[in-house]
Amino acid sequence: MKKVILLSAIFISVLVSCKNEKEMEKVPVSLDEIDLKLVSEECYSAIIKKDTISMSLNLKGSQVVSGNLSYKFFEKDKNEGSLVGVIKQDTLFAEYTFMSEGVSSVRQIVFLKQGNTYVEGYGDVVADDKGKVTFKDKKQLKFDGNVVLTKVACKI
């Protein structure tokens, strides 16, 4: 009888501890912790005639992105800077802060993910009183394939 009571007590304690572990697994980690953990780095590039566009993305969590973007246009000033944004479904929306001709600027950028490529979107834009350029209507964006960045190996 003592063995049955002892075994029952052990069995019940194991069940209770398993239940507590499962409940602990359900406790969400704070969003800040998820967003700060680097999941992967991806790099993309396009060469269009004599122009080169390069983008490196640091994917954090499933949606948060930071990275660098560079437009090197033939016989024109290059512009390069950093981007911070989010991925919503298959579309990357970001703010691109860059230097061009010695002036710092901020503009909204958008890229549509298609397999191993990102297609740059464009549309009508507006500038606020601080000079930040954003898309007038995100529903009217066009992704015609003029600028397609293909996945490449990241440079160290």
Image (spheres, rainbow, N blue to C red):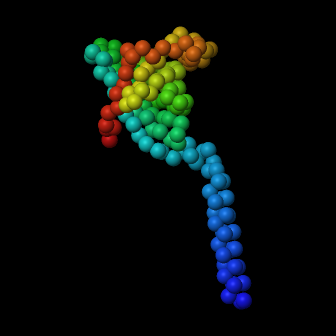
Residue 50 seen from this side: yes
Quarter of the rendering containing residue 51: top left
- Kindly identify the residue that appears in the image at 37 percent across and 21 percent down: 148
Left or right: 11 as drawn, with respect to 70: right
Residue 62 image position (x, y, % from top left) = 52, 40
* Residue found farthest to the bottom: 2
Left or right of 5? Residue 114 is left
Instruction: List the single residue furthest toward the left.
Output: 50
Residue positioned 63% across, 63% down in the render: 21
- Residue 153 lies, in percent from the top left, at 31, 37
Residue 127 vs residue 10, the one in the foreground: 10
**Image quadrant containing the N terminus:** bottom right
Q: Whole-percent x and y of residue 31?
A: 61, 44
Q: Is residue 73 above or below residue 30?
A: above
Who's the residue at 37% across and 25% down the image?
149
Residue 81 shows in this picture:
no
Query: Within the image, what quadrant is residue 10 found in?
Result: bottom right
Looking at the rendered image, the quarter that the C terminus falls into is top left
